[in-house]
């Protein structure tokens, strides 16, 4: 049988009110009395009711997060970074996979509201108007992460996607490539358009044509099919380098190049975007534009906590809060590996322990 707060009060020989003050830290209690209550809690294995505490404190110390699909390695890493930031700040994270489906998102928003989460972090890969409307209608404090959503006036923390495209294309230009193709993500998706715009900007500044672009979904198969389409061109017209707008597409592109009997990077250089952990383990290892995932997660939580404080203050004063709908942009970096430049790999002599 579970111990109750009455059992704790009886064992500690104090009132239920005193136990509540000790557990919730709502009033100063004499150290000896506090120690008796703490010992009683430990002895009985008492666990306070989270629901009751949230009603009393008007806070659950939980954050909800909506993501399109956490089986995608990039979103898995992003979720982990957000969870670590929440844990460090004393919050638990409730994760909901929306599959970028408006009906599913609406259900999850209702669930999070019923669970009285203190705020919501939203990552999305679509500009679906219904999803935007659902998010706009929710009263929960909210911050967007990774990309802003058209028509949604909420704070957002994201990477400078256009600059990432510039970094990728400039790197390939610096290696002497002149026929540089781009495998873009879904058309009309803002973050993908920005990455393609950065690629196009770098090529235009170099006075080179920016017409070799194929769009696909953000998947390995999408990159695989798009790369095969580019390789159908004659040897004189096909690209010598490709920028794929995420790492999964770049991995598909690597497979397509190998299937066609070509070499990376000798025949075609490949650069990805996101720098997921798996990028280091492709053959050859993938050059990629790294998003500052940890910094993005930490800054998103900082923004959300600020919105939560603003909303709470406005509620207490019965005034409508107006959170600054500013987009905070973080700088990407380029991580260079063997898929774009020939890299000397040390030969490991396992038995002797020597490195050549």
Image (spheres, helix red, strand yellow):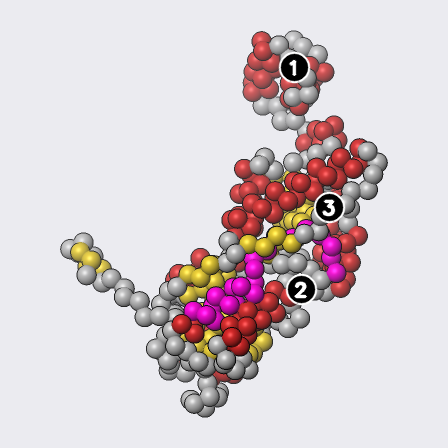
Question: Can residue 223 be seen in this snapshot?
Answer: no
Earlier sequence position, callout 1 versus callout 2: 1
Measuring 40% from the left and 74% from the top, which residue is drawn there?
Answer: 269
Q: Secondary structure at mark 2?
A: loop
Which label sits on residue 126? 2
**Is 137 drawn above or below residue 345 in the view shown?**
above
Q: Is residue 327 left or right of residue 111?
A: left
Which percent across, then down, holds residue 90? Answer: 59, 35
SS at badge 3: loop
**Lower sequence index among marks 1 and 3:** 1
Q: Which mark is residue 313?
A: none
Does the magenta run of residues contain 159?
A: yes
The quarter of the displayed image where residue 103 is located = bottom right
Q: Which residue is mark 3?
A: 323
Residue 28, numbered circle: 1
Q: Is residue 235 above or below residue 53?
A: below
- The front one of 211 and 278 is 211
**CA separation in Å, label 2 and label 3:** 23 Å
- Asked whether the viewer can see residue 236, the reply is yes
x, y percentage for residue 21?
A: 68, 18
Q: Earlier in the sequence, mark 2 or mark 3?
A: 2
Q: Quadrant of residue 3?
A: top right
The quadrant the C terminus occupies is bottom left
Asked if residue 252 lies left or right of residue 217, the reply is left
Q: Which residues are magenta?
A: 151-171
**Distance of label 1 from label 3 (alpha carbons):** 34 Å
Q: Quadrant of the N terminus?
A: top right
Q: Is residue 155 left or right of residue 269?
A: right
Does 173 lie within the magenta span?
no
């Amino acid at each position: 049988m579970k111990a109750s707060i009455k059992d704790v009060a009886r064992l500690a020989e104090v009132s239920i009110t005193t136990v509540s003050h000790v557990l919730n830290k709502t009033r100063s209690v004499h150290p000896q009395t506090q120690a008796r209550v703490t010992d009683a809690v430990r002895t009985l294995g008492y666990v306070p009711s989270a629901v009751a505490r949230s009603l009393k404190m008007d806070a659950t110390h939980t954050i909800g997060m909506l993501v399109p699909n956490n089986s995608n390695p990039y979103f898995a890493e992003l979720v982990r970074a957000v969870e670590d930031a929440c844990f460090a700040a004393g919050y638990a994270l409730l994760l909901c996979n929306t599959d970028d489906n408006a009906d599913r998102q609406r259900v999850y928003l209702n669930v999070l509201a019923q669970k009285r989460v203190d705020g919501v972090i939203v990552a999305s890969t679509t500009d679906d108007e219904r999803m935007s409307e659902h998010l706009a209608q929710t009263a929960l404090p909210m911050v967007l992460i990774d990309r802003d959503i058209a028509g949604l006036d909420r704070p957002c923390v994201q990477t400078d996607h256009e600059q990432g495209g510039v970094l990728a294309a400039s790197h390939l230009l610096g290696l002497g490539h002149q026929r540089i193709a781009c495998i873009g993500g879904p058309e009309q998706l803002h973050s993908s358009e920005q990455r393609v715009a950065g690629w196009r900007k770098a090529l235009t500044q170099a006075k080179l044509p920016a017409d070799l672009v194929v769009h696909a979904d953000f998947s390995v198969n999408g990159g695989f099919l798009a790369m095969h389409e580019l390789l159908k061109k004659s040897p004189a017209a096909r690209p010598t380098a490709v920028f794929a707008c995420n790492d999964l597409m770049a991995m598909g592109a690597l497979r397509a190049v190998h299937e066609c009997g070509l070499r990376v990077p000798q025949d075609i250089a490949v650069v990805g975007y996101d720098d997921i952990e798996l990028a280091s383990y492709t053959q050859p290892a993938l050059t990629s534009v790294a998003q500052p995932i940890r910094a993005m997660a930490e800054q998103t939580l900082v923004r959300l906590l600020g919105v939560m404080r603003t909303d709470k203050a406005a509620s207490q004063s019965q005034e409508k809060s107006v959170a600054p709908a500013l987009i905070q942009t973080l700088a990407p970096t380029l991580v260079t590996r063997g898929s774009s430049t020939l890299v000397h790999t040390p030969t490991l002599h396992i038995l002797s322990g020597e490195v050549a």
